């Protein structure tokens, strides 16, 4: 049971993630990418006139089925076989987050902020609602996310994907170094 | 039935994301603060395996299981790679999750992440409305 509940080291999980690239190509001639599923959901569920959502999303339904599979994988590995111990976070991370008022390090997200109650606070609204909006808007504007650009695109040695990945990191670095301390002080 | 294989592959990917702990908000923060190697090891080794795989597929002209030619569309550069990339980076560090982990987190029982996912869908929808007005 330990093998099922314990986390896997990076040198096991990283190569397994990389193998999704050839498996999807060989099994279905599909390029690895997750964020397109958000577009298909819009095309399928939200009525509107925008040309961007007028296409045959059913032809891309594999991507939605893959996303559903991720939810089920998350349910089995993250709920039924959840790691009983808190994630081993580096002391430096615990220390600098504690100084910003985060107390609960037991979950996958800081439960102090990521809960329904704090959706109505400025912090919670910014981190969850504005953050989610940036993820959805940004990935589509950038033409892909960590899977589509950083893994699939870089595996195919695409320069736009390298540029996008560098920008993901620049944006990602700016948040904890400059913006988050300000958000947490609100 | 033909599509059930994608459900199985998504399932496997979801399990890997949880076991790799890349769905942890704290892990993402560690990465951006250079406080742990884990995330760099994961993304780096995934890309190395991906590069080798795509190289082999091209070099040996490997076909799909149905015998089709494997096609990978090239990515075209647009200024959106930069502006959208910066936006997504901010969102990634705020929510601690990119789209794949959002699905896995919802599955793991973090119901509040459905709100983040809905907000991401809304963000994609707003992009679709504004697309023609944005520089590309």
Image (tube, helix red, strand yellow):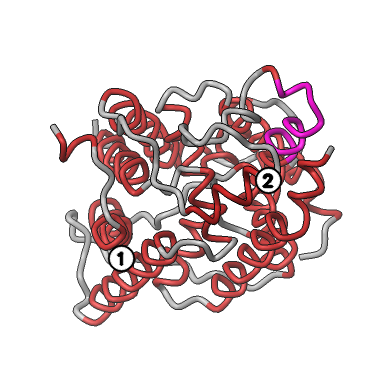
Q: Is residue A86 left or right of residue A6?
A: right
Q: Is residue B102 left or right of residue A10?
A: right
Q: Is residue B4 left or right of residue B84?
A: left
Which residue is most to the left?
A1
SS assignment at label 1:
loop
**In x, y percent, where is residue B119?**
68, 33
Pick the quarter of the image with the C terminus of chain B.
bottom right
Disc assigned to residue B70: 1
Report how many numbered discs are placed on residues in the image: 2
* Circle 2 chain: A
Whether residue B108 is situated above or below residue A33 in the rendered picture:
above
Which residue is most to the bottom?
B59
Looking at the magenta stretch, what is its main secondary structure? Answer: helix
Residue B63 on the magenta segment? no
**In x, y percent, where is residue B102?**
51, 37
Choose mark 1 or mark 2, whichever is in front: 2
Q: Residue at x 50, y 76 (%)?
A: A158
Given residues B34 and A159, the one toward you in this image is B34
Q: Which residues are magenta?
A: A118-130
Residue A125 on the magenta segment? yes
Pick the quarter of the image with the N terminus of chain B.
top left
**In x, y percent, where is residue A45?**
61, 25
Q: Residue at x 72, y 31 (%)?
A: A124
Q: Is residue A4 left or right of residue A38?
A: left
- Residue highlighted by disc 2: A99
Given residues B113 and A173, the one toward you in this image is A173
Given residues B28 and B46, the one toward you in this image is B28
SS assignment at label 2:
loop
Please identify the quarter of the rendering in which residue A128 is found. top right
**In x, y percent, where is residue A154?**
45, 72
């Amino acid at each position: 049971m330990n093998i099922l509940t314990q986390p896997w080291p990076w040198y096991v999980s990283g190569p397994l993630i990389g193998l999704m690239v050839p498996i999807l190509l060989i099994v279905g001639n599909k390029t690895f990418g997750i964020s397109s599923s958000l577009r298909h959901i819009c095309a399928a569920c939200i009525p509107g006139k925008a040309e961007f959502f007028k296409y045959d999303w059913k032809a891309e339904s594999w991507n939605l089925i893959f996303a559903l599979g991720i939810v089920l994988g998350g349910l089995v590995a993250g709920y039924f076989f959840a790691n009983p111990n808190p994630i081993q976070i580096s002391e430096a991370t615990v220390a600098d987050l504690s100084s910003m008022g985060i107390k609960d390090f037991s979950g996958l997200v800081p439960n102090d902020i990521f809960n329904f109650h704090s959706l109505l606070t400025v912090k919670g609204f910014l981190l969850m609602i504005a953050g989610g909006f940036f993820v959805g808007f940004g990935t589509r504007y950038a033409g892909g996310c960590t899977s589509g650009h950083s893994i699939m695109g870089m595996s195919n040695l695409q320069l736009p994907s390298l540029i996008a990945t560098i920008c993901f990191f620049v944006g990602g670095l700016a948040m904890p170094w400059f913006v988050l301390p300000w958000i947490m002080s609100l | 039935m033909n599509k059930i294989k994608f459900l199985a592959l998504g399932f496997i990917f979801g399990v890997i994301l949880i076991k790799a702990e890349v769905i942890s908000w704290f892990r993402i923060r560690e990465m951006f603060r250079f406080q742990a190697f884990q995330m760099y090891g994961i993304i780096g080794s995934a890309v190395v395996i991906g590069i080798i795989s795509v190289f082999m597929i091209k070099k040996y002209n490997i076909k799909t299981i149905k015998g089709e030619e494997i096609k990978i569309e090239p990515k075209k550069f647009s200024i959106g790679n930069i502006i959208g990339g910066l936006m997504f980076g901010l969102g990634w560090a705020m929510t601690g999750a990119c789209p794949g982990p959002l699905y896995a987190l919802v599955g793991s029982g973090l119901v509040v992440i459905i709100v983040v996912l809905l907000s991401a869908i809304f963000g994609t929808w707003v992009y679709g409305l504004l697309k023609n007005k944005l520089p590309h």
